[in-house]
Image (cartoon, helix red, strand yellow):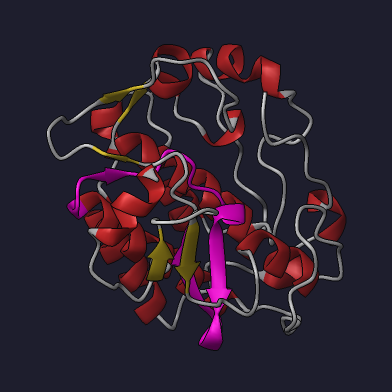
Amino acid sequence: MSELELMKNLKPHPHVVKLLGCVTKSDPLLVLIEYIPYGDLLGFLRKSRGLNDSYYKDPDVKPRTNLTSQQMMQFAWQIADGMHFLSSNKIIHRDLAARNVLVGEGEKCKVTDFGLARDVSQVVVYTKRSRGRLPVKWTAPEALLFGSYTTLSDVWSFGVVLYEIFTVGGCPYPGINGHQMADVLKKGYRMPKPKHVDQHLYDLMYQCWQQKANDRPMFSMLKTKLSKMIQNNEEIYINMREYNNDDYGYIDDLFE
């Protein structure tokens, strides 16, 4: 019901999944959303390089293979655009990850799954008061350690989504157990630059992982920077010739 109430108050946006209708006067409760034919972005990325998607059944439409640098940059910009729209409507997603982005016609990404989202129009920080399962590898330190969520904790998650996209569905923090994440982050560890990713693009990811939330860029800035990179045709930000499929073939546990 909370997810439904959030979606009912949102105007349609090209990069956020659209609510078409709902049934609340009788059981079962039904929420009708637009059909997104290519399924989740994580599976889309992994299938594009011949790997099985281990979390969702195959959608009806298969993605085409061999994604280009330009396509992946477009994915990143579209998600930043959708998240900018949500943040400007005072909504914290709290579970932003490639598995919670859907891929529609024209390879258009749409942010979805508002099950953990909160409307914070009255407050700037949302504090999680109950212990539950957390997507630890996507969760900012202040949210992981103290349960405090802001738009800037979503920015941290967006940095991890960039890693997922640019490694074509790779696992964040490979080889690190979810139970270790809090200690690892407190010690200042951040994922290193994948060798096929340009330094400027990695710098953008790294900015999202600043320890202090206020040091991270806003989604409006991320949108602008990604847009400028996309328009710079002289630079190859993701060199797929240097990409090694074997380096990013596994996905670890999502939760603690």
Query: Which span of residues is magenta-colored?
Result: 88-112
Residue drawn at point x = 55 percent, y = 54 percent: 28
Is 89 a magenta residue? yes
Residue drawn at point x = 83 percent, y = 47 percent: 250
Residue 230 position (above or below residue 184): below
Spot the residue most to the left.
122
152, 233: nearer the viewer: 152
Quarter of the image where one finds residue 190: top right
Q: Pinpoint residue 161: horizontal percent, then vertical percent.
A: 53, 51
Spot the residue most to the front.
26
197, 246: nearer the viewer: 246
Residue drawn at point x = 67 percent, y = 30 percent: 255
Q: Pinpoint residue 228: horizontal percent, then vertical percent.
A: 31, 72
Does residue 212 show up?
yes
Q: How many marks are shown on the rendered structure?
A: 0
Does residue 225 show up?
no
Left or right, residue 91 beside residue 187: left
Which quarter of the image is occupied by the C terminus? top right
235, 20: nearer the viewer: 20
Left or right, residue 154 beside residue 31: left
Is 73 a magenta residue? no
Residue drawn at point x = 50 percent, y = 13 percent: 186
Left or right, residue 86 beside residue 25: left
Quarter of the image where one finds residue 25: bottom left
Q: Pinpoint residue 30: horizontal percent, then vertical percent.
A: 50, 60
Residue 60 position (above or below residue 167): below
